[in-house]
Every structure is written in C-alpha cells, then in structure tokens.
Amino acid sequence: MGKPLRVLLVEDSEDDAVLLLRALARDGYQPTCTRVDNAPAMRAALAEGGWDIVLSDYNMPRFSAEAALGILRETGLDLPFIILSGVVQAEDVVALLKRGAHDFLHKDSLARLVPAVERELRDSESRRQCAAAEQRVRLLTLAVEQSPVSVAVTDRLGRIYYTNPKFEAVSGYGLGETKGRLFTFLATEPVSDQKLRVMWETIGAGQEWRGEFCNRRKDGKIFWEHVTIAPLKDQAGVLSHFVVVKEDITARRDYEEKLLHHANYDEVTNLPNRVLMLDRLYQSITLARRQNRQTAVLHVDLDRFKTVNDIFGHSAGDELLRVAAGRLIACVHEGDTVARVGSDEFMIILPGVSSGRAAEKVANRVLVSFDRPFHINGQEVFVTASMGIALAPTDGDNQQVLLRNADLAMGQAKEHGRNQFRFFTAGINQRVHERLQIETALRGALGRGELRLHYQPIIDLCSGKVRTIEALLRWQRADGELLAPGQFIPVAEDTGLIVPIGEWVLASACAELRRLDRLGGPPLRVAVNVSPRQMRAGDFGSVVERVLEQTALDPARLELELTESVLMDDTSDSVRTIRKLNGLGVRLSIDDFGTGYSSLSYLQRYPFDTLKIDRSFISGVERDAHSTRLVETIIAMAHGLDLEVIAEGVETAAQMDMIREHDCDLAQGYHISRPVPVDALEAFLRTWDGG
Ligand code: C2E
Ligand code: MG
Ligand code: MG
C-alpha cells in the first residue's frame, strides 16, 4: 500500500494525467486526484480543501500555471505548487518560481517527479511548523505582555532579564530599571535567611517555589505578593532561566491581618484579648521555667465600673476603659503584657521576674495612677482598681491554676475594701473553700429555720424615748455558731439568695412589731435593711405592699434602709421601685451615709425621710476635729433637705453629747443597746428610762 496523496491536477490532457498518476503510484504513492483545466473549477476544488499538493501544466487552452498560481495565492493556502510542462522559456519559469511556484519539471523526465514531491511536502511541513511556532511565540508574548499578573524572567542567577508591563504597573519599576537586578530586590520585610535559603535550594534543584513577599513600591508603598518561581530548562534539560509570576495579594493580607487582629485584640482598648493573653502567658511560664525565673500575673478589676457604665452610658464607659488601659500600660515595662480579659477586667503579665517585688511595684504604680479622676462627660469620676497577684510556678505552674489564684486574690482585695492588691496565699484558698461551704449551707438555712432577727433600738435625742427598732439579721448555724450579716450577706447577694431571705426579714420584722403593739406602749417604727439586689429584682414594691396588708401595719411605721449604691443605679428598675415604695407611704432612709458616693443631688432627687450617718464618722469625733466638723456639716445639710438624722454607732457618752450638741435627731449604738433578740428587746423597752 502506497502513501496516500491528494493531488490537485491542473491539466487539460487526460492522457498526461494518467501518466502522471502512474508515475506517482510506481514510486510508492497512492494518489487520489482531481483534474481541473479552468479557473472556476480550480477555485471550487481549492474551496473543497484537503489537498497535499498542486501539480500544474504550464499552458492550457483555457488556463495556465500562472493563473492557477494566482488563484492559489488568493486563497492563502501554502500548498506545494509544482509546474510540469513541455518546453518552456527559462525566463518564464524563473518568473513563476519568483511568484511562488516551488519547482519546475519537464514532462519527459517524470523520474524526478517523486523526489521533487517528497522534498516539497517536507518543505511545506516545516514551513507550516515554523508558522505555527511563530504564531505561538506571538501569542505567548502577547499573553505575557498583557498578563494581569506581574511576570519576570531571570537568568540562572535570578538576575532580571525581562519584566512585563504589569510588573511596572504594580511596582513602579520599568524594564530599564529592573534589568540585571535580583528579582527579590523589592522585598522589604526582613525576609528570613532561612526562607531565602529554602527558596534558592528549591529552584536551584529545578523545582517550583511558592511563597509570599512583602514588597516596597518605587513610591515607598508597601504591598504583598504571592510569588511563584518556575525554573525554565532548555531542550537539553539544562536549567537556563526562571519565570517569576507574582500576584498582588495586599487586599487579602490586609483582610487576614484584620481577622487576626480581631481574633487577638480587644476592639475597645486595642489591648490583647484573653486569647492572646493566654498564649503570652503560656510562653512566659515556659520560658521562665527554663530560665529558673518566675512569671507574675496581676488580675486587675476596676471597682464600680458597672455603676459608671449604667449612669453615663456605654460610650462613656468605653472611653473610661481606654483611658484606664493607657494608665495600666504606663505602669509596666516593655515586654510586659497588659490585656483586657473581661468587661472591666485586665490582666498584667510580668515575664521572667525574680520575686513578687516586681509585681508589688507594678501594683502600687497602678493604685497611684488610679488616684487621679477620669473625666467623663465633663464630670470627674473616680474609679479605683482591685488587684490579685499570683506567681508561677509557686502559685500554679499552668495558666488555669495561676489565673484562678490571681482571681481569688483579687476577690480578697475587693472584700477588704477595694482599691488595693493582695497576693495569693494558701489562706485565700482556704477562705474561698469556706465561702463555698457557707453558700451551700445558706441555701437551706431559711427552710431549716436557722435565720433570726435581732433588734437594736434607736432613740430620739430630744425626748430620750425609743422611736425605732432596727431589725438586724443573724444566722444561727446548726453547730451553734451565730453568724453576723457581714459573714454571709455578701454570699447571699452574690447568689441571689438575698431576695427570698430579705422577704423573710421584712415579713418577720413587721409581724414582730405588731406583736409588740399588743403588749402596749407607744407605737414604734421598725427599720429593715434592703439590699440593692432586692431593689433590682423588680417586684419589691409589691412584696412590701403585700406584707403591709398581711400584717395590717401602718406604712408610715416601716422604714426601709437603702444604701447609696441603690441611688447610683438609676438606669434600672430601682427608680421605679423607689417611687412605688414612696407611693405606698413607707419611710425611706439612706444607710451608712458618707461611705459611698455621698452625692447631694441624689438625695435631692429621691423622696428620703432619714439619713443615717455612718459610724466611722461618729467613732472619729472624739479623736479629731475634722470628723466633728464633717458630722456637723452632714447634719446641717440633711436638715436643709428636710431629712431626719440618725447617728449610727454611738458607743460613748461623749459621742452622744457631741451629736446632741449638733442637733442630731436620733441615735443608735452600743451606748444605748446592742442589737438583741426580741425578748431582750422587750426587757429593754420596759426598763429604758431615756438615758
Ligand atoms: P447597718 O444597717 O449599718 O447596721 C448597723 C450595724 O452596726 C449592725 O451590724 C450593728 O450591730 C452595728 N452597730 C450598731 N451599733 C454599733 C456600735 O455602737 N458600735 C459598733 N461597732 N457597731 C454597731 P450588724 O448587725 O453586723 O449588720 C451589719 C450590716 O449588715 C448592716 O449594717 C446592714 O447593712 C447589713 N444587714 C443586717 N441585716 C440585714 C438584712 O436583714 N438585710 C440586709 N440586706 N442587710 C442586712
Ligand atoms: Mg441599717
Ligand atoms: Mg449603717
């Protein structure tokens, strides 16, 4: 079987055509052939396509090789065109060869035909391949030139040989400036030697490398690129160039950085958050262990921040937090960490300290820095900080234990009056343990009937008569111990147990007063302490209303003692409750005056009847003139607001004389009577002669 050959034969002689095909067949071809002898037929045949070669007679009655060649050129097809003819003038042949014919053969020497066909087919194929290659190069060049990503081509040493227009657009450097430089010349980030070494090793071994670079534009702007470096090998497989393709990923990096920041930093203060703090703490503990040093953590809790937040609003609260954060940072050294770990809680980590001294120094600095007021909405506000300090590894060698212990120590600082710091000690652990036991026992105390009320008389300083009895709670524990409120009320408040307990106190005190009524004697008032937590519980007004109804007590004989913190809480239900209580006709008194915010504007705003001066002022009057002046001022001021004044904690005759001298209305204290159970109170009432 011969090679197939599709021949377009331009020939008027059928006989010549047969001879020709026979010659081809003889030398190994299996030709199929279409014979044309005029222009339209030629055009039609070319349009059909699929030809390998055109063999054309020189001259025909209605056609010629020249015309046929012209038609072939028109179509743009690059087919071998061989002229076969009888005798022809040499110059005519040359003219046709010049116009694109590929060869000329004499009809008499057909032996040359097949070699000529073969050569022309070969030439044609290589011409075709060349054109295709050129076309591809053109396309690739265009692709690189117009590529949406930066492309650089370098030599084997990474020196730039070509950069595309996008490279210039992104970096600001044109080819004139980049040529000959190392392709890493834009990198600004202190690229680690390790990263560069790995890169060179990888590409040097003929492998692709991908990575990210932080670069600087010609105008100084920083941008990020994802870089792919691919080695180029020549035909022999030898590495000759590198192609560097770079994609601008600044937007993605920005976004990632924002996400990372969001995950690790607090939005309000821009300090590290709990997540980052835990990480830093872990690092510090590990490093300190290796260096035989300690890590100190200070748990900082802002005192009364929630009150400020409630009164001034959240944006003012945020502003305060920012200022507080700034002050905390100013208290530590570089390398220490200040983190915000809760709404008003901060954590300071001091890595690698040699003792607790460093933590103590920082804590003292914090206390001093919170001595200054914060300016919120044009007002001066004082917010202090309570701190707990724990050291690793002594107080715990992992984050959890260390943080818990710092927290416990902080709780102790709060309990001891805030605005101070405490180191964690084993004793604290013990106390926390006890507190937990109190909580458990207190939950059942009401049901087991372990709660008692003691009463302390309050006398009128003019007449000397008992005017009021204050109900004070006691807890008679199963083991016989009698607990004062200071030992369990904070727990009751924290757990919410104060709500049912407070209700019991109110009902019991009112019922007891009615019982005393039946024994005769002048009608007394009863004073009942109310915790802020009860005021916030919502329906305290209704509770009081119900108790008054059930005991048929004249509301004017019930005096509810509130603390100043309730007044600060004026965004909550407390205000509504106060109004409701006032509407019921019960008396309201402000307890422990002088220990809280002591703001006159609050007293003016709410319907109080009585002000109780805290006993710390009364105990001071014998010692210093300053306290005496304060007591004098408070009494005068309270009278100015139409408030009755009670002096609490009167323990001596001298104190009694002093407050009487300054027109105080009422007095309460050990000098008159301690708080006592109700039968002892009855005995007191019978024998009391007015002092
Ligand atoms: P408070 O309302 O200011 O009560 C006066 C406290 O001062 C009582 O302490 C009383 O025993 C004490 N005291 C009275 N006179 C003197 C004195 O001359 N010298 C000294 N050193 N102390 C005197 P107590 O009974 O331990 O109660 C402490 C606090 O517990 C009360 O302070 C009150 O805030 C709270 N509390 C007591 N009972 C209740 C209650 O039923 N409910 C609530 N929520 N709190 C209560
Ligand atoms: Mg009281
Ligand atoms: Mg008091």
Image: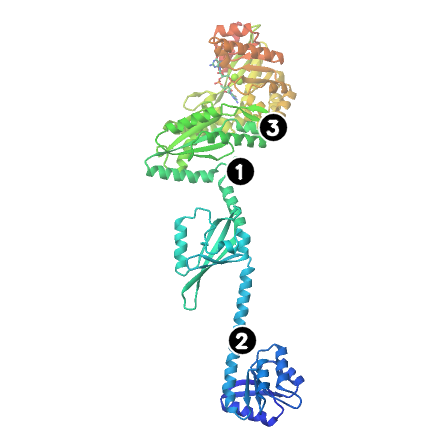
Find the distance from the CA under tag 3 to the CA under tag 2. 89 Å
Whether residue 270 is visible, yes or no, is yes
Q: Which mark is residue 267?
A: 1
Q: Earlier in the sequence, mark 2 or mark 1?
A: 2
User: As rendered, which of 46 and 404 lies closer to the eye?
Assistant: 46
Q: Residues within 10 Å of mark 3 (few under 14, many from 20)?
A: some
Residue 131, image x, y percentages: 54, 72
Task: Find disc 3 in the rendering and name its residue.
Answer: 571
Q: Residue at x 42, y 63 (%)?
A: 240
Residue placed at 41% from the left, 68% from the top?
Answer: 236
Circles 3 and 2: CB atoms closer than 8 Å: no
The residue nearer to you, when weighing 135 against 674, is: 135
Residue 447 in sight here: no
Q: Is residue 278 above or below residue 604?
A: below
Q: Is residue 44 depicted above or below 406 in this figure?
A: below
Element under disc 3: loop
Instruction: Name the amino acid type tagged 3.
Output: Thr
- Whether the residue carrying mark 2 lies under 8 Å from ligand 1 is answered with no
Measured in 3D between alpha carbons, the distance from the residue under mark 2 to the one under mark 1, in whole angstroms, is 67 Å
- Residue visible at 43% across and 68% down? 235
Q: Which residue is mark 2?
A: 128
Circle 1 — which element? Answer: loop
